[in-house]
């Protein structure tokens, strides 16, 4: 019975992980929308801090682009920042792939008419 129970718990974890990853793009899209544009359920989930809100995600889009990488939940960002996950991951990518984090400043203007409240300019 032990291995069967283990597989059951593993399957539950894998399904939860799959659903979270699958919903990542949808939740990210909602983080870019204003309250009146997104579904009411998504707005409710943002208000009770299950999904990352527009204001929380907006911090990711401004210089130095070093926080709130995870668009799913503000709680995940807090935990990932606490353990320095993103800096560690950047160092791995730098070391093995030679790709460095964004170093140039993006030029943008704040504009509430655009998603995330900013408009990038060339």
Image (cartoon, grey):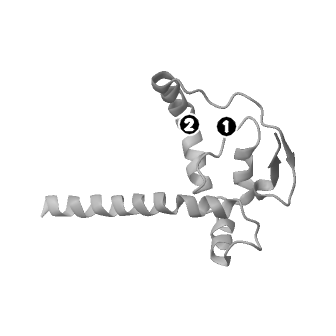
Q: Nearer the viewer, residue 115 or 80?
A: 115
Which x, y percent locates residue 20? 47, 60
The C terminus - image quarter: top right
Q: Residue at x 71, y 53 (%)?
A: 56
In the image, taking residue 97 as reference, residue 65 lies left or right, namely: right
Which x, y percent locates residue 24? 54, 58
- Assess whether mark 2 and mark 1 are in contact (beta carbons under 8 angstroms): yes
Disc 2 target residue: 86
List the single residue furthest toward the front.
Answer: 122
Determine the image quadrant of residue 47.
bottom right
Disc 2 crowd rating (10 Å Cα; few below 14, some 14-19, many 20+) is: some
Secondary structure under the numbered disc 1 in the rendered image: loop
Secondary structure under the numbered disc 2 in the rendered image: helix
Tally of numbered tags: 2
List the single residue furthest toward the left.
Answer: 1
Q: Residue at x 50, y 29 (%)?
A: 93
Q: Is residue 94 above or below residue 55?
A: above
The CA distance from mark 1 to mark 2 is 8 Å
Identify the disc placed on residue 84. Answer: none
Identify the disc placed on residue 66. Answer: 1
Which x, y percent locates residue 68? 65, 46
Q: Residue at x 87, y 46 (%)?
A: 109
Q: Nearer the viewer, residue 79 or 92?
A: 92
Q: Residue at x 57, y 39 (%)?
A: 82
Disc 1 crowd rating (10 Å Cα; few below 14, some 14-19, many 20+) is: some
The N terminus - image quarter: bottom left
Pointer 1 or 2: first along the chain: 1
List the single residue furthest toward the bottom.
Answer: 40
In the image, taking residue 49 as reference, residue 58 lies left or right, namely: right
């Amino acid at each position: 019975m032990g291995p069967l129970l283990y597989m059951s718990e593993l399957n539950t974890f894998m399904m939860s992980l799959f659903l979270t990853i699958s919903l990542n793009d949808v939740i990210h899209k909602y983080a870019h929308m204003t309250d009146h544009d997104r579904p009411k359920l998504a707005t409710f989930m943002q208000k009770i801090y299950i999904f990352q809100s527009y204001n929380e995600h907006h911090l990711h889009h401004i210089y130095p682009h070093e926080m709130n990488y995870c668009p799913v939940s503000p709680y995940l960002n807090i935990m990932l920042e606490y353990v320095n996950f993103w800096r560690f991951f950047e160092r791995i990518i730098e070391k093995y792939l030679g790709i460095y984090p964004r170093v140039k400043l993006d030029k943008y203007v704040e504009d509430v008419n655009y998603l995330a409240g900013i408009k990038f300019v060339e």
